[in-house]
């Protein structure tokens, strides 16, 4: 991945920066130019809470080239308290433990390596929260 | 808008066609369609293709294909909507003929997937690169998430998914053009290797080469070319949020639902009028979700419909009599056109042992990505 393309995404990937639509209040992650719900164009910057609940999930066994060493790995759509949804890997758990409703923390992790460019690509992965009590 | 008919079809077998190049697949299907009606010169050509650029390094397909067909000079346009490219190309041609801009329009869907590139990576480019693929999701992975959401919402089981694969393989045994002409058992499906939990290898459509062509003309000229034209009653298309995470209900295919509403409204045909349909079963779960989005059954009831035998021969509405993407094969850009060919054969009464008795109205549903685009056509015997 050429470095400018990577660098442009850093605010959303490293800091979970999202946009809250000034017209309708929808939280859009990553931020866009136009609100998909009301087509508003004014946004205020918000940081997503680094936690959420699993909406749906899978365990990837046949992986893309860059992730083959990690397979099988669970992935999930996670919804944060702000209502934003993210596609993330789930880690530090047994794959079969990932199910809808599971509470997770979003932790800053290495996602992939761009071998030829020498770029380490970071972002967030989900880690199940310790059970209460 | 003029009425539009399909007057001829042509199709290569689907499969691993090592002897045949992308351009030769195109020419083979196109020539078969043109030759069926005496080899007329088309007024325009539409090429449905997802990714010649990634699969074989070839873009600018439309003039290349016109040239290789011997028709350099004819206007030609390539249409891309991932795995719905073929359906989208057909739709463009339908409106060009309907609008009166052209009389004879050739539509060819084509894909060459077996020439060496990593197919998983290429197909993933139909998902959102920045928010999905970056994190390691695959296409089967996205549909696996749809499957788990469906299971959570409606109690759908892995066995329900497997029943779809078994049915479509059984249909495919009767299709001489199908990639896999053998039956599979429920046990074989449910013990095949895991691709993305809960989807196993035999829930997934294969990697295929192939091309499919149809020739369109105004209905009032169709009898000049054939005794058995099939009318395209209408077309519906819709989009949905690209990323699965951005869809309100990951178990429901909004683009399919919206496209179906538009097609039903445009044609006056309702779900209960459909006698045979080809739907986009890229993964077994997709067929169940599509049946629900097409209103052929209520939400959450497609598995029951399938288990009751209502979607096979003798049932209420046979689905994927061609074998579907699962058994017939899925050369992605060709699929939408190949679906139309199966319905044309059914409505002409030329589907051989796959024939649905007295079918007069049929539907095709083609889908791109994890459901971000869908194209639907309704056909009628005339």
Image (cartoon, helix red, strand yellow):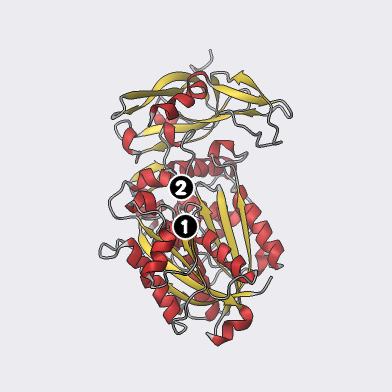
Disc 1 and disc 2 in contact, CB within 8 angstroms: no
Residue B158 is marked as 2
* Residue bearing the label numbered 1: B164
In this rendering, does residue B362 appear at all?
Answer: yes
User: Where's residue B162, x and y in %?
Assistant: 44, 53
Name of the residue lying farthest toward the left: B19
Where residue B32 sits, quadrant-wise, is bottom left
Q: Earlier in the sequence, mark 1 or mark 2?
A: 2
In this rendering, does residue B174 appear at all?
Answer: no
Circle count: 2
Viewer-side residue, B381 vs B284: B381
Q: Tell me which residue sits at (64%, 72%) in the image.
A: B100
Which structural element holds mark 2? helix
User: Where's residue B237, x and y in %?
Assistant: 61, 56
Mark 2 falls within which chain? B
Q: Tell me which residue sits at (38%, 51%) in the image.
A: B53
Q: The N terminus of chain A lies in which quarter of the figure?
A: top left
Tell me: B198 left or right of B192.
right
Compared with residue B214, is residue A65 higher up or lower down, i.e. above or below?
above
Q: State the CA–CA distance, disc 1 to disc 2.
A: 10 Å
* Neighbour tally class for label 1: few under 14, some 14-19, many 20 plus, Cα within 10 Å: many
Compared with residue B359, is residue A64 higher up or lower down, i.e. above or below?
above
Mark 1 falls within which chain? B
Q: Which of pointers 1 and 2 indicates the residue nearer the eye?
A: 1
């Amino acid at each position: 991945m050429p470095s400018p393309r990577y660098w442009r995404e850093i605010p959303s990937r490293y800091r979970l920066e999202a946009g809250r639509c000034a017209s309708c209040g929808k939280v859009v992650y990553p931020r866009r130019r136009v609100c998909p719900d009301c087509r508003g164009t004014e946004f205020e910057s918000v940081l997503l809470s680094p936690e959420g609940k699993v909406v749906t999930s899978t365990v990837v066994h046949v992986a893309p080239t860059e992730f083959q060493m990690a397979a099988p790995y669970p992935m999930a759509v996670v919804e944060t308290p702000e209502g934003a949804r993210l596609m993330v890997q789930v880690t530090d758990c047994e794959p079969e433990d990932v199910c809808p409703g599971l509470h997770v923390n979003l932790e800053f992790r290495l996602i992939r390596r761009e071998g030829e460019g020498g770029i380490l690509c970071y972002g967030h992965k989900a880690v199940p929260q310790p059970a209460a009590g | 808008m003029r009425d539009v008919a399909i007057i001829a079809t042509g199709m290569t077998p689907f499969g691993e066609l090592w002897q045949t190049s992308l351009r030769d697949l195109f020419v083979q299907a196109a020539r078969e369609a043109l030759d069926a009606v005496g080899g007329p010169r088309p007024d325009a050509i539409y090429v449905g293709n997802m990714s010649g650029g990634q699969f074989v390094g070839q873009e600018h397909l439309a003039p290349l294909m016109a040239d290789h067909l011997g028709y350099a000079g004819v206007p030609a346009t390539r249409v891309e909507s991932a795995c719905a490219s073929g359906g989208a190309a057909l739709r463009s041609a339908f409106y060009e003929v309907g609008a009166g801009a052209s009389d004879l329009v050739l539509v060819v869907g084509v894909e060459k997937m077996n020439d060496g590139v990593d197919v998983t990576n290429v197909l993933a480019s139909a998902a959102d690169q920045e928010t999905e693929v970056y994190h390691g999701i695959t296409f089967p992975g996205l549909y696996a998430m749809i499957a788990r959401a469906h299971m959570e919402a409606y109690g759908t089981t892995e066995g329900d998914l497997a029943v779809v694969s078994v049915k479509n393989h059984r249909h495919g045994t009767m299709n001489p053009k199908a990639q896999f002409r053998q039956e599979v058992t429920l046990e074989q499906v449910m013990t095949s290797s895991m691709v993305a939990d809960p989807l196993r290898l035999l829930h997934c459509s294969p990697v295929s080469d192939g091309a499919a062509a149809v020739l369109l003309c105004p209905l009032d000229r169709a009898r000049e070319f054939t005794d058995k034209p099939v009318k395209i009653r209408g077309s519906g298309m819709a989009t949905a949020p690209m990323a699965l995470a951005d869809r309100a209900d990951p178990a429901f295919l909004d683009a399919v639902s919206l496209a179906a509403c538009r097609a039903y409204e445009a044609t006056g045909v309702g779900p209960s009028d459909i006698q045979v349909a080809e739907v986009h079963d890229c993964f077994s779960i997709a067929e169940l979700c599509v049946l629900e989005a097409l209103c052929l059954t209520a939400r959450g009831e497609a598995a029951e419909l399938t288990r009751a035998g209502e979607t096979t021969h003798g049932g209420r509405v046979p689905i994927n009599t061609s074998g579907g993407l699962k058994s017939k094969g899925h050369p992605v850009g060709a699929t939408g056109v190949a679906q139309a060919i199966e319905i044309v054969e059914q409505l002409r009464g030329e589907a051989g042992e796959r024939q649905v008795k007295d079918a007069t109205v049929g539907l095709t549903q083609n889908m791109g990505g994890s459901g971000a685009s869908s194209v639907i056509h309704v056909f009628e015997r005339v």
